[in-house]
Amino acid sequence: MSSHESNNNSENLTSDGLNRRGFVQAVGATAAAASLAPATLVNAGVDKKAQPEMLVQKLYETLTPKQKKAVAFDWDHKDGRGLLRTHVSNNWHITKPKIASNFFTKDQQDIIEAIFNGLYSPDWRPQIRKQLQDDAGGYGKSQSIALFGTPGTGKFEFVMTGRHLTIRCDGDSTEHVAFGGPIFYGHAAEGFNEEKDHPGNVYWHQALKANALLPMLDGKQRKQALVPKAPQESKIAFQGPKGELPGIALSELSKDQLAHAEGVLKTLLAPYRATDQTEALACLKAQGGLEKCSMAFYQSDDIGEDGVWDMWRIEGPSFVWHWRGAPHVHVWVNISNDPSVKTNARG
């Protein structure tokens, strides 16, 4: 639960007659089920009203004109950062009001929290909370939200931003892209400059999984996979089918090597709800799958000079998963089924 609840009367009721604590717990449980594939939803009899997308509509309907002016925008709203809906950065806010501030009512805060919970796999929620605690003093303290379009009437998108966080909910209304557009995650577990092995970092296991591919490669393959210098981390625009992708082409891997690469991808997707994982894989398949991607391990910024590469990237025609592990973890994700989709990223 978010920190604002410790000072509230737990018997205070939502408009549906649930107390706030019960509302977040009930919605969290239902949203976990709602992250399953659509066919499973029907078979399980899941209440679709508790899915994050429906909760976004519920939230929008509760906003006052003053609140809408501050956090709700037209679908193609632009500011000095360009098309705001497609922007992504490592530490930014679309809007000023913080989630835990009195700008939002307690009921609205609970709905926002339930949306946030529903975007992640239940198994991963404790790790996400740890990251937010380490990086931003906890959930809701410094994160803000924005809504684009009008939920329930066509295209819409909910975005939560903050330090080491950009996460989206769009109900598949944003065409061609996974996750509703580019996302970002990161963690500085024990200070800005992390040590070798990244103690306490909730994402370091992803890098270890990726690095475990290298011992499986022969000398020629390893030479292809190792690249001297990493690109700028925010360079996640798509190169298309004719692009020069860094590292080793995954089409050159043996069956067991490719199976490990598939395991890396599974590990990367694990924090997110099942529907977003499925959408990301469908986008990748539309561009030829992992076999159309490359994987690069960057020799620059090797913390501890231990040959466990902190910087690496998987990239395809319209797929970028850039993993920066020095001086702490920054990860940029951009996935589409169409390489012509533009991204507004800024480091």
Image: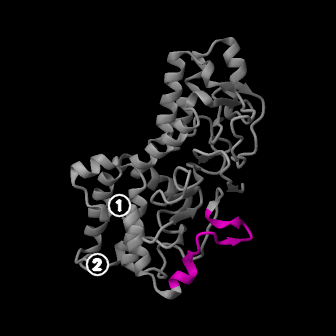
Give the amino acid at mark 1. Answer: Gln
Q: Quadrant of the N terminus?
A: bottom left
- What numbered label is drawn on residue 51? 1
Which residue is rendered at x = 48% and y = 61% of the image? 170
**Residue 2 visible within the image:** no
Which residue is rendered at x = 78% and y = 34% of the image? 229
Q: Secondary structure at mark 1?
A: loop
Q: Is residue 41 above or below residue 86?
A: above
Q: Quadrant of residue 219?
A: top right
Q: Nearer the viewer, residue 55 or 6?
A: 55
In the image, is 236 to the left or to the right of 60?
right
Which residue is rendered at x = 47% and y = 73% of the image? 100
Q: Nearer the viewer, residue 224 or 162?
A: 224
Q: Is residue 213 above or below residue 56?
A: above
Give the residue pinned by disc 2: 14
Q: Which residues are magenta?
A: 67-85
**How far from the left and from the top, in percent, is residue 107?**
36, 77
Q: Quadrant of residue 312?
A: top right
- What numbered label is drawn on residue 138? none
In the image, is 14 to the left or to the right of 330?
left
Which residue is rendered at x = 58% and y = 70% of the image? 75
For the image shown, how many numbered marks are present on the structure?
A: 2
Label 1 neighbour load within 10 Å: few <14, some 14-19, many 20+ = many
Label 2 neighbour load within 10 Å: few <14, some 14-19, many 20+ = some
